[in-house]
């Protein structure tokens, strides 16, 4: 009998090859805070998926899948009205939890409002970045973001941040920091 030695090919120590794009059910920095204004949504791509990011009526970031559940239009082409995201195609409006709050052709108390929703992702702002928990929070509840990031990001008043222009890298954010 011959024995086969199975080795795991690693990109960097502790990160197996094939995981360079990233894993689900983790927090990811998806946008720099200063890039996200109050009045316009922004489309971003992470883990090969398209997302839309905007600020709600309180100024907090919100993240949804970038497809309207009605006719699959890109929600990032819509607009923000009173902290809600409105689809440019037919005007459906969504809150940060992905719940439809307005269907223009339906009455305000329509049962359809409870049936229509876009996939939402937990989002937070920390250390000058907008973070999204890209996974299934019902099955895998997100840990507190402050426990998952480098300690320095939790102390804005103690550190001076220099930001370079945004570039798109097809890699896990941790690989960029460790391997860079």
Image (spheres, rainbow, N blue to C red):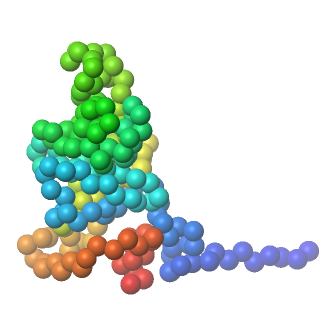
User: In the depicted view, which residue is nearer to us: 17 or 45?
Assistant: 45
Q: Residue at x 19, y 58 (%)?
A: 36
Determine whether 111 is above or below 46 in the image: above
Q: Quadrant of the C terminus?
A: bottom left
Q: Is residue 123 visible?
A: no
Q: Which residue lies most toward the left here? A: 157
Q: Is residue 6 visible?
A: yes
Q: Quadrant of the N terminus?
A: bottom right
Determine whether 161 is above or below 67 in the image: below
Where residue 159 sits: x, y (%)? 13, 78
Task: State the image quarter where residue 57 is shown.
Answer: top left
Q: Residue at x 18, y 80 (%)?
A: 162
Where residue 48 sits: x, y (%)? 47, 58
Task: State the image quarter where residue 110 is shown.
Answer: top left
Where residue 109 sits: x, y (%)? 22, 15
- Is 5 left, or right, of 151 in this rendering? right
């Amino acid at each position: 009998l011959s024995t086969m030695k199975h080795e795991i090919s690693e990109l960097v120590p502790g990160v197996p090859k094939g995981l360079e794009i990233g894993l689900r059910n983790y927090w990811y920095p998806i946008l720099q805070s200063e890039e996200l204004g109050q009045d316009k949504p922004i489309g971003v791509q992470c883990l090969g998926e398209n997302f839309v990011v905007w600020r709600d009526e309180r100024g907090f970031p919100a993240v949804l899948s970038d497809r309207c559940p009605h006719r699959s239009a890109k929600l990032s082409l819509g607009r923000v009205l009173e902290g809600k995201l409105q689809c440019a195609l037919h005007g459906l409006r969504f809150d940060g939890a992905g719940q439809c709050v307005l269907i223009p052709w339906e009455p305000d108390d329509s049962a359809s409002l409870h049936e229509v929703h876009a996939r939402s992702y937990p989002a937070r702002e920390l250390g000058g970045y907008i973070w999204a928990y890209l996974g299934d929070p019902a099955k895998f509840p997100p840990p507190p973001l402050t426990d998952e990031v480098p300690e320095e990001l939790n102390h804005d008043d103690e550190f001076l941040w220099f930001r370079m222009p945004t570039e798109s890298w097809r890699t896990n954010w941790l690989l960029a920091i460790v391997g860079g």
